Amino acid sequence: MQDIHHMQMNAIDTFLAIARDGSFHAAAEALNVTQTTVSARIRVLEEELSISLFDRGPGGTQLTASGRQFRPYAEQMQRTWAFLKSGGAAPLQDRLSLRLGAQLSMWDAMLVDLVIWLEEQKGKLPFILNYDHALNMGEAVTQQLLDLAIVTEAPHGTRLQVEDLPPEELILVSDQLLDLAGPQMGQNLPLFINLDFGRHYDRQVQEVIPKGSRQHIVLGNAGMALRYLHKRGGMGFFPRSMVAEALRDGRLQPVAGVAPMWLDCKALYHSGSPILSQIEEAIQGLRSLRCP
């Protein structure tokens, strides 16, 4: 079994070396193996996955669409394998192992709070894997790269378990006093910081801010966007909890004439997971944190 795992990780390492260095030849040199070995490893990996990972052409070796989709999974497997080989799992033997992910960056803080809640309430400290927010959370749970994911919308036709959590309230805030219902605004709206929170968010934004009067910058990370707002000025929809302190001390102002926006919050997991009891504890924690 150890040899099989070693062979699989060799193939993963080889795939990532090609993706990084741009050619089979460069990967072979980096890994100190022959190019024939590199080709053989990729061929076996493609056969096991039933996908094509690379396109070879005059401009070099490029990842296919499937290869680009597979890359973050491969990177996570490489990091996890390195962690286990280093003996890093030993201190966690008597603790909860729970892999968490969130679709939107505004829930990063909630996952940190969940870790603290589990440690304080249950005496357990989760081992959290950090994921790119662009990762498809439904696929990550389906393929068991994640045990529990927080999303705004469950994948269509999913067989995963979906638990509804209290929705996220977003309020429009600005660094200056504004009233979007007032006649003085006209076309002179300040910079709008667009957090790109999905289709439902986009529809609600379009109802509030006319396209013709909107100048905006897109920032996908909520923490970065809030820092930008403080430094640059403008306005944007943020979770109420994230801007509560700035509203209290007057650094930000709620924009008048605009109702709060609500985004669904759902927990996604496998009902047949071998750590279902730990997942249910985590969901209990999420409910507690969202309904203090």
Image (tube, rainbow, N blue to C red):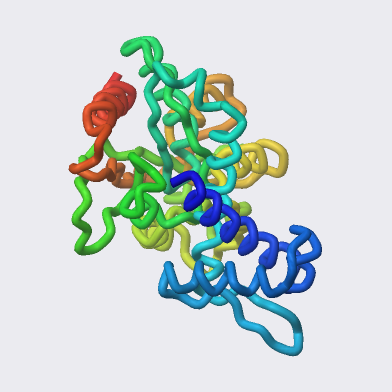
Tell me the quarter of the picture where residue 59 sits. Answer: bottom right
* Along the line of sight, the residue nearer the viewer: 93 or 220: 93
The image position of residue 290, as x and y in percent, is 31, 27
Q: Can residue 67 be seen?
A: yes
* Depicted 171 relative to depicted 21: above or below: above
The image position of residue 207, as x and y in percent, is 38, 60
In-image side of 136 versus 269 (left or right):
right
Q: Residue furthest bottom?
A: 58
The residue positioned 58% from the left and 48% from the top of the image is 78
The residue positioned 54% from the left and 48% from the top of the image is 76
How many numbered tags mark residues here? Answer: 0
* Depicted 97 relative to depicted 266: above or below: above
The residue positioned 43% from the left and 68% from the top of the image is 49
In-image side of 176 versus 96 (left or right):
right
* Along the line of sight, the residue nearer the viewer: 253 or 129: 129
In-image side of 144 versus 277 (left or right):
right
* Depicted 168 relative to depicted 286: above or below: below
* Along the line of sight, the residue nearer the viewer: 59 or 268: 59
Q: Can residue 220 be seen?
A: no
The image position of residue 85, as x and y in percent, is 58, 35
The image position of residue 72, as x and y in percent, is 54, 55
In the rendered image, the quadrant that contains the C terminus is top left
Tell me the quarter of the picture where residue 10 sits. Answer: bottom right
* Along the line of sight, the residue nearer the viewer: 271 or 106: 271
The residue positioned 30% from the left and 42% from the top of the image is 265
